[in-house]
């Protein structure tokens, strides 16, 4: 069953930038689905379309069977590229604020996740490093019991130990049937976790399929396949 | 409670504006006798005699000295109270959406709350903050006047307080709308000030007098006829409702990026 269905999705912003040019793909329930591409390929626009933050210029997006724009689909938890939180509060207050509007948020689950991610609770958000902000955002997002997690660069600024922990959390959620849509520039970590993927370039899909199939057809690892594909697209 | 975050975000600004308004209200009542005696100083009287507007000013000063209702109108309800209320409307409204978009914290809300929930929670909590702030300022003035034994008809004082509350709601609603239009916090702040100046200037011309919101808020007419002015109040509230609806439609259809 498809959790996300994207059909002929195009998005042109008001400034004339064509971010997406008729892309189509489906995301299977319980899978870890990666969206890869160089800067400006349309990854974040795709994630925001799935979330319902932006209106497609044409085409259709169905997230958990519903059109996400404008109201979103509440069984989705999103970690954006910029891990911006309310600077004026301390972490426990931030958790309280998040719990007040995030559906199915479990403070207990947050506590477990924050311990796993080695998060220092007493500090003000404004004083947190980039890595600690990422940890906090990831812990908040996964403390929500939802069907779909949409993650944009969820390991940004993390050390290798915590990065591994985040990848474990992603895997554990997929094992229990949750779907994770994942975008990252770190191809080695995507290769560790993802089942299916699309590779985007200049708003178009260069590859849509499973990771195994990609590696089999090229006899290369993901990084090499990705580079070959991106360079090939430039020819 | 989905409004928890909005309450936390606005509470400090509300407390500060309330404290400023209440403090100024108390000071305005307390300095009444000082103001009157200062206006009675020989130097002031002398300069009035030499001024072309001397007669008018002298009668104005005499009215301020002898009629507390007029003092209240000229120094508080028609002046400081209204000006600080307008400032409160800007302070409470300009960061509503623009700050969330500028700081990109809007992505915490998008997807977790529907657009109507986000919009209505933000704007309506601000309405409550406006009402508390403005009512607090009005009540502080009325209570201080009573304690100090000044004769201020309560119908008159409450009519002004009510009008300024309603007028400030509209100013706040305008501010909430302009906050939607920009990703930066500075632009809605400046646009609000420009709108206020425009509204103030409109009162000087016959053709645009109907736009004079400040004339409704701190109106001199209340001195003669101390009522809330049902017709203009309904018009102001209707405009508020229209801008509220337009704001929602704008927020509903906009890309959050």
Image: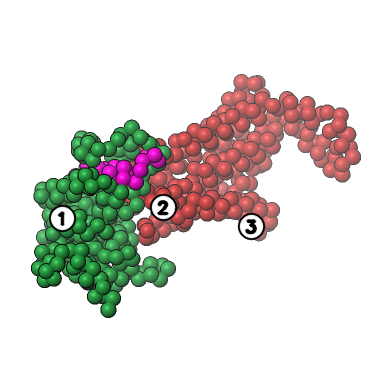
Q: Nearer the viewer, mark 2 or mark 1?
A: 1
Give the residue number, with chain letter if any, for mark 1: A192
Q: Residue at x 47, y 47 (%)?
A: B95
Q: Range of the magenta residues?
A: A125-145
SS at circle 1: helix
Q: CA distance from mark 2 to mark 1?
A: 34 Å
Q: Is residue B26 magenta?
A: no
- Labelled disc at residue B208: 3
The chain letter for the residue carrying disc 3 is B
* Front position in the image: A13 or A91: A91
On screen, B42 above or below A164? above
Are the two marked residues, 2 and 1, in contact with CB atoms closer than 8 angstroms? no
Q: Residues within 10 Å of mark 2 (few under 14, many from 20)?
A: many
Query: Tag 3 or tag 2, which sits nearer the N-term?
Result: 2
Is B16 located above or below residue A165 in the figure? above
**In the image, residue A174 lies at what x, y percent?**
13, 51
Q: Nearer the viewer, mark 1 or mark 3?
A: 1
The quadrant of the picture occupied by the C terminus of chain B is bottom left
**Which chain is indicated by disc 1?**
A
Q: Quadrant of the N terminus of chain B?
A: top left
Pointer 2 indicates a residue of which chain? B
- Residue at point 46%, 57% (across, down): B181
Tell me the tag on residue B101.
2
Q: Which chain is green?
A: A
Instruction: For mark 2, give the secondary structure.
Output: helix
Q: Which chain is red?
A: B
């Amino acid at each position: 069953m498809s959790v996300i269905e994207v059909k002929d999705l195009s998005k042109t912003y008001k400034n004339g930038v064509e971010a997406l040019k008729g892309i189509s793909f489906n995301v299977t329930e319980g899978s870890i689905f990666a969206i890869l591409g160089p800067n400006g390929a349309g990854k974040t626009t795709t994630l925001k379309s799935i979330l319902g933050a932006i209106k497609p210029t044409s085409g259709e997006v169905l997230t958990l069977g519903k059109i996400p724009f404008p109201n979103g689909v509440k069984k989705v938890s999103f970690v954006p590229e910029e891990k911006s939180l309310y600077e004026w509060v301390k972490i426990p207050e931030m958790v309280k604020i998040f719990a007040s509007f995030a559906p199915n948020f479990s403070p207990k689950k947050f506590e477990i996740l924050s311990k796993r991610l080695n998060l220092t609770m007493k500090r003000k958000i404004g004083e947190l490093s980039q890595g600690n902000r990422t940890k906090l955002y990831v812990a908040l997002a996964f403390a929500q019991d939802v069907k779909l997690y949409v993650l944009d660069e969820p390991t940004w600024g993390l050390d290798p130990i915590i990065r591994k922990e985040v990848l474990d959390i992603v895997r554990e959620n997929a094992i229990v049937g949750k779907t994770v849509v994942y975008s990252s520039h770190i191809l080695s970590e995507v290769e560790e976790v993802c089942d299916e993927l699309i590779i985007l370039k200049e708003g178009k899909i260069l590859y849509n399929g499973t990771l195994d199939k990609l590696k089999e057809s090229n006899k290369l690892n993901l990084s090499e396949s990705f580079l070959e594909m991106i360079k090939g697209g430039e020819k | 409670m989905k409004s928890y975050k909005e309450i936390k975000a606005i509470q400090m600004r509300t407390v500060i504006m309330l404290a400023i308004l209440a403090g100024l209200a108390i000071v305005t009542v307390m300095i009444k006798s000082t103001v009157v005696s200062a206006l009675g100083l020989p130097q002031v009287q002398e300069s009035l005699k030499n001024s072309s507007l001397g007669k008018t000013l002298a009668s104005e000063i005499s009215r301020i000295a002898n009629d507390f209702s007029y003092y209240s109108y000229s120094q508080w309800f028609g002046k400081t109270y209204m000006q600080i209320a307008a400032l409160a409307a800007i302070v409470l409204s300009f960061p509503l959406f623009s700050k969330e978009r500028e700081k990109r914290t809007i992505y915490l809300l998008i997807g977790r709350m529907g657009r109507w929930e986000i919009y209505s929670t933000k704007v309506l909590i601000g309405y409550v903050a406006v009402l508390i702030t403005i009512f607090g300022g009005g009540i502080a003035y009325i209570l201080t006047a009573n304690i100090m034994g000044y004769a201020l008809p309560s119908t008159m004082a409450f009519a002004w307080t009510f009008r300024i509350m309603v007028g400030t709601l509209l100013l706040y609603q305008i501010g909430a709308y302009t906050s939607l239009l920009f990703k930066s916090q500075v632009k809605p702040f400046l646009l609000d000030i420009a709108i206020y100046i425009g509204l103030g200037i409109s009162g000087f011309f016959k053709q645009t007098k109907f736009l004079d919101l400040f004339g409704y808020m701190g109106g001199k007419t209340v001195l003669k006829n101390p009522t809330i002015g049902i017709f203009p109040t309904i018009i102001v509230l209707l405009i508020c409702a229209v801008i509220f609806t337009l704001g929602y439609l704008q927020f509903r259809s906009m890309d959050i990026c």
